[in-house]
Image (tube, rainbow, N blue to C red):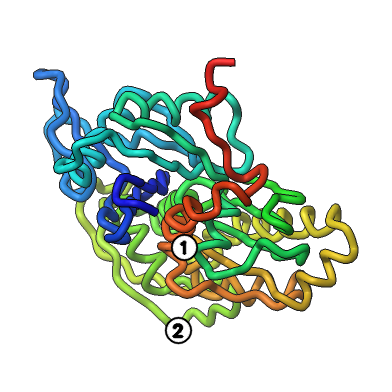
Amino acid sequence: MSSMDIGIDLGTANTIITIGGKGIVVNEPSVVAYDKKKKQVLAVGAEAYRMLGRTPEYIVAVKPLADGVISDNVMAESMISEFIRKVSGSMLLKPRIIICVPSSVTDVERRAVVEAALSAGARKVYIIQEPIAALLGAGVDISKPDGNMVVDIGGGTADVAVVSFNGIVNSKSVKVAGNKFDDAIIKYISGKYKILIGEKTAETVKKSIANVFNPTGEIKMEVKGRHLIKGLPVTQEISDLDVAMAVSDLVVEIIDSVKSVLEITPPELVGDIHHNGIVLTGGGSLLGGLDKCISRETGVPCYVADNALECVARGVSEAFKLSEELLDGFEKISLYRYK
């Protein structure tokens, strides 16, 4: 990966950018703060994230990605442009950029990603599918005819895929991931305790006390929110059992996706997967006890990759070295985007 190559893990929750020779240079929330009066972007990334839920009516904090793909082209282009400007300000030539997308991305969604990168100043744009990048970033050798299974759970989607000989054999993408976990926690606490909490609070709860494998109800923490009936600020103690109940349906959906991909995978590769284990990557994979749940329900060893949050970004960086070897997971958009 040369100094003119930029890798982008364009995530629903976070955008991680790598640059040749420097590694990860940006790891910030995928948020844009926009002033509707002045019609201009005020901030992107961490600075914009701090504004969520704290701005006057004419300033909105926008998340331009939903379910793993661009939902607001203008805001996404502004965000990508600003991030690229941050990391390539001293570059004399326009960089090559590789962007990661879910395995189930449509042609329309793919075009939106490519156009955003080109508008942001890319010389060439490449697309790599998340399962390929995730396994590369986890240090798995995917070049051999040996079955490897990855479950990459980001902020908007969970990608389940079987990879062998540099290509995706079978895959499934479901819109169940970190943001849906947060929404489910908000909904559950609202229904049970009649308290409305914010997105940041829900995320803190998820990271702090979630245990979906064997919750006991003994691990607790206090949350602050607004009482839905009284309309006043209140504090409520919740437990790991509350969190497990809140996200149980979503966990089942992820496990069902893993099972469905295994069911259509050739027996030889299933044997490889049983030997190699299932790799979990992405921020959503850090949900407490999720790896043990998947292993219990499938009978296949399952483990969370080292530095799971950055696996995809690191894989994107590695992909430039393997652009000639990678098959359907790596596409040179600049050659055919207008065909």
The three-letter code of the residue at mark 2 reads Glu
Q: Earlier in the sequence, mark 1 or mark 2?
A: 2
Which is nearer the eye, 213 or 21? 21
In the rendered structure, find residue 43 and report the number of the disc placed on it.
Answer: none
Per the model, the C-alpha gap separating discs 1 and 2 is: 33 Å
In the rendered structure, find residue 311 and report the number of the disc placed on it.
Answer: 1
Q: Position of residue 138 (x, y in %)?
A: 53, 68
Q: Position of residue 270 (x, y in %)?
A: 83, 66
- Residue 28 left/right relative to 169: left
- Residue 53 left/right relative to 38: right
Residue drawn at 15 percent across, 38 percent down = 43
Q: With respect to residue 183, does 151 lie above or below?
A: below
- Residue 20 left/right relative to 115: left
Q: Which residue is mark 2?
A: 218
- The quarter of the image holding the N terminus is bottom left
Which is nearer the eye, 113 or 20? 20
Residue 197 appears anywhere in the view: no
**In the rendered image, which quarter is residue 213 located in?**
bottom right
Query: How packed is label 1: few (under 14 Cα within 10 Å), some, or many (20 or more)?
Result: many
Residue 79 appears anywhere in the view: yes
- Which residue reaches farthest left? 38
Q: In what element is the residue under mark 1?
A: helix
Q: Position of residue 320 (x, y in %)?
A: 47, 50
Q: Position of residue 168 (x, y in %)?
A: 70, 50
